[in-house]
Amino acid sequence: MMIQSFKHIVTAFAVIVGFSLQLQAATLDELYDELARADAPVAERIEAEIVAEWEKSGSPSLDLLLRRGEDALDNDDPELALEHFSALIDHDPSFAEGYNARATAYYQLNLIGPALDDLRTCLGLNPRHFNAMRGVGVILEDLGRSREALEVYKTVTGINPMSVGVQDAIDRLELEFEGQAI
Protein backbone atom coordinates (compact mmCIF):
# COMPACT_ATOMS: atom_id res chain seq x y z
CA MET A 1 0.00 0.00 0.00
CA MET A 2 2.83 2.39 0.91
CA ILE A 3 4.61 1.72 -2.41
CA GLN A 4 1.40 2.34 -4.37
CA SER A 5 0.88 5.65 -2.55
CA PHE A 6 4.49 6.65 -3.23
CA LYS A 7 4.03 5.87 -6.95
CA HIS A 8 0.98 8.14 -7.05
CA ILE A 9 2.91 10.94 -5.39
CA VAL A 10 5.82 10.58 -7.83
CA THR A 11 3.42 10.48 -10.79
CA ALA A 12 1.58 13.58 -9.57
CA PHE A 13 4.86 15.41 -9.06
CA ALA A 14 6.04 14.49 -12.58
CA VAL A 15 2.77 15.74 -14.07
CA ILE A 16 3.00 19.03 -12.14
CA VAL A 17 6.63 19.62 -13.14
CA GLY A 18 5.88 18.77 -16.77
CA PHE A 19 2.89 21.11 -16.79
CA SER A 20 4.94 23.84 -15.13
CA LEU A 21 7.68 23.59 -17.77
CA GLN A 22 5.09 23.71 -20.58
CA LEU A 23 3.41 26.68 -18.92
CA GLN A 24 6.75 28.50 -18.63
CA ALA A 25 7.50 27.91 -22.32
CA ALA A 26 4.01 29.07 -23.30
CA THR A 27 4.38 32.11 -21.08
CA LEU A 28 7.75 33.01 -22.63
CA ASP A 29 6.36 32.52 -26.14
CA GLU A 30 3.47 34.80 -25.27
CA LEU A 31 5.83 37.38 -23.79
CA TYR A 32 8.01 37.35 -26.90
CA ASP A 33 4.91 37.84 -29.06
CA GLU A 34 3.77 40.75 -26.90
CA LEU A 35 7.27 42.24 -26.95
CA ALA A 36 7.36 42.23 -30.75
CA ARG A 37 4.19 44.38 -30.82
CA ALA A 38 4.70 46.60 -27.77
CA ASP A 39 5.42 50.31 -27.65
CA ALA A 40 8.35 51.59 -25.56
CA PRO A 41 6.82 51.83 -22.05
CA VAL A 42 5.08 48.46 -22.32
CA ALA A 43 8.14 46.87 -23.96
CA GLU A 44 10.30 47.74 -20.95
CA ARG A 45 7.90 45.90 -18.64
CA ILE A 46 7.69 42.86 -20.93
CA GLU A 47 11.46 42.79 -21.36
CA ALA A 48 11.83 42.79 -17.56
CA GLU A 49 9.36 39.87 -17.32
CA ILE A 50 11.33 37.90 -19.92
CA VAL A 51 14.61 38.54 -18.12
CA ALA A 52 12.99 37.45 -14.85
CA GLU A 53 11.97 34.17 -16.52
CA TRP A 54 15.51 33.69 -17.88
CA GLU A 55 16.89 34.14 -14.36
CA LYS A 56 14.80 31.31 -12.89
CA SER A 57 17.12 28.36 -12.53
CA GLY A 58 14.69 26.21 -10.59
CA SER A 59 17.16 25.93 -7.73
CA PRO A 60 17.44 28.32 -4.77
CA SER A 61 21.19 27.71 -4.48
CA LEU A 62 21.76 28.46 -8.17
CA ASP A 63 19.56 31.56 -7.92
CA LEU A 64 21.73 32.67 -4.99
CA LEU A 65 24.92 32.20 -7.04
CA LEU A 66 23.40 34.25 -9.86
CA ARG A 67 22.39 37.05 -7.45
CA ARG A 68 25.80 37.07 -5.78
CA GLY A 69 27.51 37.29 -9.15
CA GLU A 70 25.20 40.11 -10.25
CA ASP A 71 25.87 41.92 -6.97
CA ALA A 72 29.61 41.55 -7.53
CA LEU A 73 29.24 43.07 -11.01
CA ASP A 74 27.20 45.93 -9.52
CA ASN A 75 30.05 46.49 -7.04
CA ASP A 76 32.67 46.57 -9.83
CA ASP A 77 34.19 43.23 -8.83
CA PRO A 78 34.16 41.15 -12.02
CA GLU A 79 36.70 38.68 -10.61
CA LEU A 80 34.34 37.72 -7.78
CA ALA A 81 31.40 37.69 -10.21
CA LEU A 82 33.35 35.31 -12.44
CA GLU A 83 33.80 32.91 -9.53
CA HIS A 84 30.08 32.90 -8.72
CA PHE A 85 28.99 32.51 -12.34
CA SER A 86 31.55 29.74 -12.97
CA ALA A 87 30.26 27.84 -9.92
CA LEU A 88 26.72 28.32 -11.22
CA ILE A 89 27.65 26.91 -14.64
CA ASP A 90 29.58 24.01 -13.04
CA HIS A 91 26.40 23.04 -11.16
CA ASP A 92 24.04 23.53 -14.11
CA PRO A 93 25.67 23.74 -17.54
CA SER A 94 22.22 23.98 -19.17
CA PHE A 95 21.32 27.31 -17.50
CA ALA A 96 21.69 29.87 -20.29
CA GLU A 97 21.58 32.94 -18.04
CA GLY A 98 24.69 31.74 -16.22
CA TYR A 99 26.67 31.94 -19.46
CA ASN A 100 25.28 35.36 -20.33
CA ALA A 101 26.18 36.68 -16.88
CA ARG A 102 29.66 35.16 -16.97
CA ALA A 103 30.21 36.67 -20.42
CA THR A 104 29.61 40.08 -18.87
CA ALA A 105 32.25 39.41 -16.21
CA TYR A 106 34.71 38.17 -18.84
CA TYR A 107 34.05 41.25 -20.95
CA GLN A 108 34.66 43.56 -17.99
CA LEU A 109 37.97 41.74 -17.44
CA ASN A 110 38.79 42.31 -21.14
CA LEU A 111 38.72 38.55 -21.79
CA ILE A 112 36.97 38.80 -25.15
CA GLY A 113 37.46 35.22 -26.36
CA PRO A 114 35.90 33.62 -23.28
CA ALA A 115 33.11 36.23 -23.34
CA LEU A 116 32.26 35.33 -26.94
CA ASP A 117 32.40 31.61 -26.13
CA ASP A 118 29.93 32.07 -23.27
CA LEU A 119 27.62 34.21 -25.42
CA ARG A 120 27.71 31.52 -28.11
CA THR A 121 26.80 28.87 -25.52
CA CYS A 122 24.03 31.05 -24.10
CA LEU A 123 22.54 31.55 -27.57
CA GLY A 124 22.81 27.81 -28.24
CA LEU A 125 20.71 27.20 -25.14
CA ASN A 126 18.38 30.19 -25.65
CA PRO A 127 18.40 31.40 -29.29
CA ARG A 128 16.09 34.34 -28.47
CA HIS A 129 18.31 35.76 -25.72
CA PHE A 130 18.39 39.32 -27.03
CA ASN A 131 20.74 40.51 -24.27
CA ALA A 132 23.34 37.93 -25.29
CA MET A 133 22.90 39.00 -28.92
CA ARG A 134 23.38 42.62 -27.92
CA GLY A 135 26.59 41.58 -26.14
CA VAL A 136 27.83 39.89 -29.31
CA GLY A 137 27.09 43.10 -31.23
CA VAL A 138 29.04 45.22 -28.76
CA ILE A 139 32.03 42.88 -28.91
CA LEU A 140 31.95 42.76 -32.71
CA GLU A 141 32.02 46.55 -32.77
CA ASP A 142 34.95 46.55 -30.35
CA LEU A 143 36.75 44.18 -32.71
CA GLY A 144 36.15 46.51 -35.67
CA ARG A 145 33.62 44.16 -37.26
CA SER A 146 30.89 46.79 -37.56
CA ARG A 147 29.04 45.23 -40.48
CA GLU A 148 28.59 41.98 -38.58
CA ALA A 149 27.57 43.95 -35.46
CA LEU A 150 24.93 45.75 -37.52
CA GLU A 151 23.44 42.43 -38.61
CA VAL A 152 23.38 41.18 -35.02
CA TYR A 153 21.68 44.38 -33.85
CA LYS A 154 19.06 44.00 -36.57
CA THR A 155 18.43 40.46 -35.36
CA VAL A 156 17.92 41.83 -31.83
CA THR A 157 15.28 44.28 -33.07
CA GLY A 158 13.50 41.40 -34.79
CA ILE A 159 12.92 39.93 -31.34
CA ASN A 160 12.87 43.08 -29.22
CA PRO A 161 12.12 46.11 -31.43
CA MET A 162 12.37 48.55 -28.51
CA SER A 163 15.66 47.18 -27.16
CA VAL A 164 17.40 50.03 -25.34
CA GLY A 165 20.29 51.45 -27.33
CA VAL A 166 20.12 48.92 -30.14
CA GLN A 167 18.21 51.14 -32.56
CA ASP A 168 20.71 53.92 -31.83
CA ALA A 169 23.56 51.54 -32.65
CA ILE A 170 21.83 50.52 -35.89
CA ASP A 171 21.30 54.17 -36.89
CA ARG A 172 24.92 55.02 -36.03
CA LEU A 173 26.33 52.10 -38.00
CA GLU A 174 24.04 52.66 -40.98
CA LEU A 175 25.16 56.28 -41.07
CA GLU A 176 28.77 55.09 -40.92
CA PHE A 177 28.14 52.84 -43.91
CA GLU A 178 26.03 55.35 -45.83
CA GLY A 179 27.12 55.38 -49.46
CA GLN A 180 28.84 52.01 -49.07
CA ALA A 181 27.38 48.66 -50.05
CA ILE A 182 26.18 46.79 -46.98
Image (cartoon, helix red, strand yellow):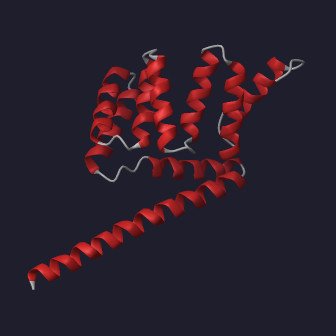
36 sits left or right of 45 in the view? right
Left or right, 137 with respect to 147, comes to left
Q: Residue at x 22, y 76 (%)?
A: 9
Residue at (31% x, 31% y) in the render: 86
What percent of the width, then of the height, locates residue 150? 71, 27
In the rendered image, the quadrant that contains the C terminus is top right
Image location of residue 26, percent across then percent down: 53, 63
Give the answer, above or below, for where 26 lies relative to 46: below
Residue located 30% across and 44% down the image: 62
Quarter of the image for residue 30 reads bottom right
- Residue drawn where x is 90% and y is 18% of the image: 179
- State whether residue 38 appears in this view: no
Up the image or down, 32 lies above or below 158; here it is: below
Q: Is 129 rendered above or below residue 119?
A: below
Q: Quadrant of the N terminus?
A: bottom left
Q: Quadrant of residue 67?
A: top left
- In this view of the protein, which residue sits in the foreground, 57 or 77? 57
> Can residue 32 be seen from the camera position used here?
yes
Q: Residue furthest left?
A: 2
Q: Is residue 15 left or right of residue 129?
A: left
- Residue 107 in the image: state x and y as whole percent: 47, 21
- Residue lying at the far right of the rendered structure: 179
Where, by quadrant of the figure, is residue 31 drawn? Answer: bottom right
